[in-house]
Amino acid sequence: MKGFGKYVIFLGSLFVRRETFKTYYQLVLEECIIIGIGSILLFVLVSTFMGAVSTIQTAANLVNPLIPRYIISQVVREMTILELAPTVMAIIYAGKVGSSMAGGLGTMRITEQIDALEVMGINSSSYLVLPKIIASILMYPLLVIVAGVCSLVGGYLVGTLTGIMTAEDYIYGIRLAFNPYFISFALIKSLVFAFLISSISSYKGYYTQGGALEVGIASTSAVTTSVIAVLLSDYFLAQLLL
Amino acid sequence: MIKINRISKAFNGKPVLDNISGEFDKGKTNLIIGSSGTGKSVLLKCIVGLLQPDQGSVYFDLRNFTEADKDMKSEIRREMGMLFQGSALFDSKNVEQNVMFPLDVLTTKTLEEKLDRVNFCLKRVGLENVNSKMPSEISGGMKKRVGIARAIVNNPNYLFCDEPNSGLDPQTSIVIDELIKEITEEYDITTVVVTHDMNSVMGIGEKIMFLYKGHKLWEGSYHEIMNSGVKELDDFVFTNKVMKNLKGKVTSL
Ligand SMILES: Nc1ncnc2c1ncn2[C@@H]1O[C@H](COP(=O)(O)OP(=O)(O)OP(=O)(O)O)[C@@H](O)[C@H]1O
Ligand SMILES: [Mg+2]
């Protein structure tokens, strides 16, 4: 609980004594590039395979000949949009981006780089952390969209290449009874997850104390805490918005 | 000139600094010495405002820094330069970007003016042709020099160094010490150096404050340090046999 209070105060500190807009613009741009380039390959890989595997497994479960094959791609679509792309990817995002944010800030803390910024009269938390959070909120939804598309493409490739279903069936299923609100829901979720992961990981890194060992601990605990926060908020958002 | 007035600081109820007062003169290298864990770094952090003292105040040329509002604080901070114990160079930036950083955020100079100033400062600390090297590619002594260049790049009035020569060989230490002393005299700034290195004490200790377990026990110059009559200081100064034999035989240096 004490940790949570400190986290809230930390978030508040991000918005005081800010640098010029131009400085932030550049920093956000840099972070966006780091996050985007750094995670795109992993996202494409994981989501393509997830789509492919979901297709095979759904097909394996739908053995009843009365159920049309296009139901498979409909199920894959719903799974992808509602859970695989925003939530499962968030866990991967926490492992990839969250841990590196915490590790980077933790290293800056223990090597006094954060103190060096403070001595120059810079608000180090807002200078270092705010751009990371903004960049995350901008980039993560884009990554989720990419992941969603890749997952459906992965399903298509496996579905048609292994002869589970025809291309026409797959496309038909994907478009069947489509509820566009689910897309909005996925994007809302991804905004929330992006904020949670980047702010929690930054918080863990920013308040590292000690040495290299503690930096390692901070980045592990950043991943654990962000994942828990993501799963909890996933549950509440589903209750709230569905 | 920096004046500190009755500074106390405790961590979790454990006192680390107790009622420390003193002055650091302009144009001189002022030393804070004492053995490990006596609170030297904490005192320095209280002075530059990285830690808030529980009691007491710090004055920068008669301006009360401890009670200053945010604007005043950042104004005074713009006049500070600090060399950290581990150099604290930003690892994502190269040497040139590191030294230029204070100019980027604190001034509105053009890129050319900034580059001129950066190259001048790097030359001043004896570093040339390393502009594009990353901090991980240069040696510890070079890092300290880059740290000094970064600390002086924005023409500070106050320079702080936390153990500028820890982890360096005696020769490089002397070079760094001399550099700090020269810069202090050349620009007539107030420099505060934390150290536990006796070579520095004898080399550049124009004004020395000796801390012992959070108390200030002695103040003076290196001329007087051999004959202070303070037992704790003698224990700190005369650590080995050779030095102990010298004791009493040296009247003045
Ligand atoms: N942030 C902190 N929280 C709790 N205790 C601290 C903190 N910073 C310093 N201390 C304690 O204050 C005391 C003085 O520490 P300080 O770093 O000032 O020593 P020092 O004189 O600089 O020693 P050294 O020469 O080894 O650097 C130590 O006992 C240390 O444990
Ligand atoms: Mg120290």
Image (cartoon, rainbow, N blue to C red):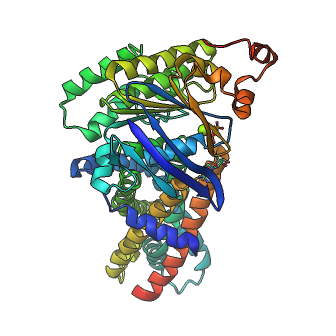
Between residues B70 and A35, which one lies in front from this camera angle?
Answer: B70
Q: Is residue B218 above or below residue A87?
A: above
Q: Residue at x 36, y 62 (%)?
A: A137
In which quadrant of the rendered image does the N terminus of chain A lie? Answer: bottom right
Residue plotted at (23% across, 50% down): A20
Q: Is residue A63 visible?
A: yes
- Tell me which corner region of the image, top left, top right, bottom left or bottom right, holds residue B179: top left
The residue closer to the viewer here, A182 or A233, is A233
B243 w.r.t. B15: above or below: above
Ligand 2, seen in the image, is in the quarter at: top right
Specify whether residue A175 is in view.
no
Q: Nearer the viewer, residue A77 or A190?
A: A190
Percent x, y of residue B41: 57, 41
Figure quadrant of residue A13: bottom left
The number of numbered discs placed on residues in the rendered structure image is 0
Looking at the image, residue A114 sits to the left or right of residue A27; the answer is: right
User: Does residue A183 lie above or below A152 as drawn?
Assistant: below
Quadrant of the image containing the C terminus of chain A: bottom left
Residue A142 placement (x, y as % from top left):
35, 60
* x, y percent for residue A196: 46, 67
State the residue lying farthest toward the right: B241
Residue shown at 51% from the left, 81% from the top? A235
Looking at the picture, how far across and down is residue A67, in whole percent?
51, 85
